Image (spheres, rainbow, N blue to C red):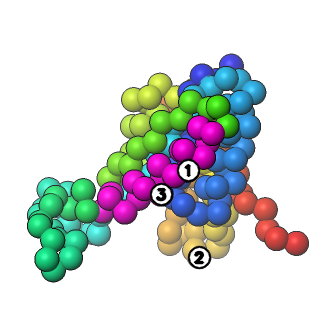
């Protein structure tokens, strides 16, 4: 029986599909959902570097600027799931997606990770790799990966 299900979300259709399945599993098992979005910094930018999001804005740490755009979107998704009488936590973290997903799974004591995958193959897979594949290899708990269905 799963008590805590981690759902990494990158705001793609694949992630929405995974969140819908996680919702169904959570309802069946009475589990809590933990949504996490990992915001990545541009290469070479220190998370503590002070940056301004607009010419007249006060400088803030880069990690705050990068994460701020994702918070409202993730909170909206969490609110919709809560309307279905689910216990849902949501957080935005900054860093490497694989490292942060695994760290979050450990921190929240997840029993299961449910995540979408884009299903890249060939050269795209070799160049970009698969976050889902690397999470599966590193995860301390079972990982359910889903590919969104192609429209027919």
Tell me where residue 16 sits by quadrant. Answer: bottom right
Q: Main secondary structure of the magenta part?
A: helix
Query: Residue 126 appears at what percent x and percent y?
Result: 55, 69
Residue at image position (16%, 58%) is 61
| Residue 87 part of the magenta-drawn span | no
Residue 49 or 55: which is nearer the viewer?
55
Q: Is residue 15 above or below residue 7?
A: below
Q: Are marks 3 and 1 in contact (CB under 8 Å)?
A: yes
- Residue that mark 1 sits on: 77
Left or right: residue 91 versus residue 5 is left
Alpha-carbon span between mark 3 and mark 1: 7 Å
* Mark 3 nearby-residue class (10 Å; few <14, some 14–19, many ≥20): few
Task: Judge whether residue 40 can be spotted in this image.
Answer: no
Q: Residue beneath label 3, please?
A: 73
Closest to the observer, 149 or 137: 149
| Residue 28 appearing in the image | yes
Residue 122 vs 60, above or below: the answer is below
Which residue in the structure is indicated by mark 2?
Answer: 123
Give the number of marks.
3
Q: Secondary structure at mark 2?
A: helix
Q: Rate crowding at label 2 as few (under 14), some (14 to 19) or many (20 or more) other CA atoms within 10 Å.
A: few
> In the rendering, at what x and y percent does residue 104 appear?
42, 37
Residue extent of the magenta highlight: 66-83
Name, please, the residue furthest toward the right. 152
């Amino acid at each position: 029986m799963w008590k805590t299900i981690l759902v990494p979300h990158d705001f793609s259709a694949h992630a929405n599909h995974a969140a819908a399945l996680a919702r169904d599993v959570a309802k069946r098992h009475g589990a809590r959902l933990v949504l996490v979005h990992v915001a990545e910094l541009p290469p070479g930018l220190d998370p503590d570097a002070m940056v301004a999001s607009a010419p007249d804005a006060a400088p803030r740490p880069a990690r705050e600027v990068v994460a701020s755009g994702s918070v409202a979107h993730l909170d909206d998704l969490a609110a919709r799931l809560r309307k279905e009488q689910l216990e849902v936590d949501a957080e935005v973290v900054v860093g490497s997606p694989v490292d942060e997903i695994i760290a979050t799974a450990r921190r929240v004591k997840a029993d299961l990770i449910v995540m979408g995958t884009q299903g890249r193959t060939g050269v795209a897979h070799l160049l970009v790799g698969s976050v889902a594949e690397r999470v599966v290899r590193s995860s301390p708990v079972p990982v359910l990966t889903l590919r969104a269905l192609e429209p027919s």
